């Protein structure tokens, strides 16, 4: 979903936007190291047109840091658990620096054992999930990640919300082609997209959520104010969301989406949960052939009429941004500059 | 979906049904070892009320074996690839004996490395997927499996079918409770359930599939005769189905769902593809705590009003069958006895 606005668009070089975001994050309580990781992540989402996780998120990062809910200076503690298992205690900080701290060890294990898992707990994830997995595909690896979030989804057949939007992201290399990457909320809609629709005064399609009384609604504000989202695809999406709670929280040692209490931290927006990342080295079974087979899949999908591969829109936006700079509105840019002080 | 029939139901002890199925499979070309694995699998599905993969499948097994399409005597070749990676060439036989041959090594690796993957290729999978994963949860492990099948699903946004029904199955232990297990086709409906509806002359709900001209239909026969299924949950289910092609076929070295040609084998029903199984040892991060956390999840799901957990109906049917025998119709039993000779 694009960020709807009547404010004119401007283009800013990626490095400039990243530096601006880094300044904002450091000014509000992040260490330089954490701010660098988050600024790159957020600027990348904006660059790729993933606006629900772009600069739209910066006020939420800031209010959360100011509230004391997240530790912007946390040092992740990496434990080498077994030949295919890495664990990180994110120390109440963000998940992305925890991944960055463990990443080299995770890749080394995946290449040696053929598969490896990274279990992050005590972590806050407030970003898109595809930036976590796409770089593995750039290195020829296959990656799958899940993260749970905060109670806002009614399990299929239940009466009240319990699960988070609990996204699943996947990345695989593809010969002579951008990696195949998807990142999907297991809710009918991503929370950020509901927020954007509410801000823009837009109605949602049917089947996305319920209001505070549990009745179906197309009003994004009714979903955000006491209502809840539904899982995508009925009982199947609901089962996948349940799986995400088990893998991202129970398995890692993180909180379930309903377990943390941020009521003492007004302004807190970041779910304090866990994240799991599984990385497979496809060369272990099929040598260099995997990326070629992946390419054959893409060609067949195109042959049956698919006009756009998952993730393709991001690559197109990225290419334009590489030439012309990252698009944001004048209003957004002015807001960022104000936050940077 | 239950097997609809006007024929009266009978109850047969599990061991008796299993022996009958084993006789049928051996009589039509399976080795004793392969027949034992398949008979147990199929009798288990019938026992648990999973009728689309119960004795309903036996005529398909028989016609496939008779056609020479599958090797019922194949000896799986297991390769110990790396500390977390096992590969099996099923030799053009069934996937279940390949899993059985590699299972001990896979579990040993998962317990040692924390995670391990089994990549099966050159295999036929004609059964439910939950029997492959549930036993891992019985041993305290978490398992995820995917298998691709045969072209019958139109990718979201495409015009023609390409993907198989491509199920995903997941199993996790749960303290003082049956394991949490789900097995979902990434198509809007499982192929076996469409066949059962066609046989019973029932119409399907809307959104399940299209006819030969690509138009939406609720007629199961129109889907089976030149039509196709749709993915569940629109573009998200479609992306998951694509992921299954990549993991079960490209990664393992198996065929994609559209790559095998069984036209020279009239009666052939079993997709000749691949299967991936990932097994994680949850004790590596959280000791014995995982199953307790899993139990907490179940209790919370019940607290928000969920009346039935995924897999729960199977456990109930299994319990009844344990006391009273496995239910099938007189007509089905007579058909099996005839096939047994």
Image (cartoon, coloured by chain):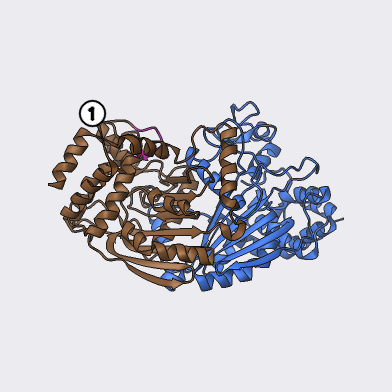
Chain colours: A blue, B brown
Name the residue rendered at 36%, 66% in the picture.
Answer: B88
Vertical position of residue B124 compared to residue A33: above or below: above
Magenta stretch: includes residue A132: no
x and y, in percent, of residue A59 in the image: 77, 48
x and y, in percent, of residue B56 in the image: 26, 41
Side of B14 where A112 appears, left or right: right
Q: Which residue is mark 1?
A: B8
Q: Chief secondary structure of the magenta span?
A: loop
From where the camera sits, is residue A330 visible? no
Magenta stretch: includes residue B209: yes
Name the residue rendered at 50%, 50% in the picture.
Answer: B172
x and y, in percent, of residue A339 in the image: 83, 52
Name the residue rendered at 66%, 56% in the picture.
Answer: A121
Quadrant of the snapshot with the C terminus of chain A = bottom right
For the residue pair A279 and B243, the one nearer the viewer reads as A279
For the residue pair B319 and A231, the one nearer the viewer reads as B319
Q: Quadrant of residue A182?
A: bottom right
x and y, in percent, of residue B222 in the image: 28, 38
Vertical position of residue B269 compared to residue B188: above or below: below
Residue reaching furthest left? B341
Vertical position of residue B15 compared to residue A205: above or below: below
Q: Label 1 marks which chain's residue? A: B
From where the camera sits, is residue B244 visible? yes
Q: What are the residue bounds of the magenta stretch?
A: B204-211
Element at label 1: loop
Side of A168 where A271 appears, left or right: right
Question: Are there few (<14), some (14-19), or many (20+) residues within 10 Å of tag 1?
Answer: few
Q: Quadrant of residue A71?
A: bottom right
For the residue pair B312 and B144, the one nearer the viewer reads as B312
């Amino acid at each position: 979903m694009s960020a709807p606005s009547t404010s004119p668009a401007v283009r800013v070089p990626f490095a400039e936007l990243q530096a601006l975001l880094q300044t904002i994050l450091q000014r509000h309580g992040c260490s330089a190291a954490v701010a660098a990781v988050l600024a790159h992540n957020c600027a990348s989402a904006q660059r790729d047109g993933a606006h629900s996780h772009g600069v739209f998120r910066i006020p939420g990062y800031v209010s959360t840091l100011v509230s004391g809910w997240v530790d912007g200076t946390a040092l992740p503690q990496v434990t080498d658990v077994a030949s295919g298992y890495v664990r990180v205690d994110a120390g109440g900080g963000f998940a992305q620096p925890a991944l960055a701290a463990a990443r080299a060890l995770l890749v080394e294990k995946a290449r040696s054992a053929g598969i490896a898992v990274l279990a992050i707990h005590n972590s806050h994830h407030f970003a898109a999930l595809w930036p976590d997995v796409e770089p593995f595909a750039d290195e020829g690896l296959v990656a799958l990640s899940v993260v749970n979030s905060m109670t806002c989804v009614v399990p299929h057949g239940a009466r009240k919300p319990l699960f988070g939007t609990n996204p699943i992201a996947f990345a695989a290399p593809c010969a002579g082609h951008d990696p195949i990457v998807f990142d999907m909320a297991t809710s009918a809609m991503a929370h950020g997209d509901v927020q954007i629709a509410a801000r823009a005064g837009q109605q949602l399609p049917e089947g996305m959520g319920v209001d505070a009384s549990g009745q179906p609604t197309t009003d994004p504000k009714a979903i955000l104010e006491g209502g809840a989202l539904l899982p995508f695809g009925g009982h199947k999406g609901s089962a996948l969301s349940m799986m995400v709670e088990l893998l991202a929280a129970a398995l890692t040692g993180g909180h379930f989406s309903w377990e943390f209490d941020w009521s003492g931290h007004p302004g807190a927006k970041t779910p304090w949960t866990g994240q799991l990342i599984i990385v497979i080295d496809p060369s272990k079974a099929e040598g260099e052939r995997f990326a070629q087979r992946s390419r054959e899949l893409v060609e067949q999908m195109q042959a049956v009429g698919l006009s756009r591969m998952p993730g393709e829109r991001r690559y197109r936006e990225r290419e334009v941004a590489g030439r012309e700079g990252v698009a944001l509105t004048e209003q957004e840019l002015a807001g960022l500059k104000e936050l940077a002080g």
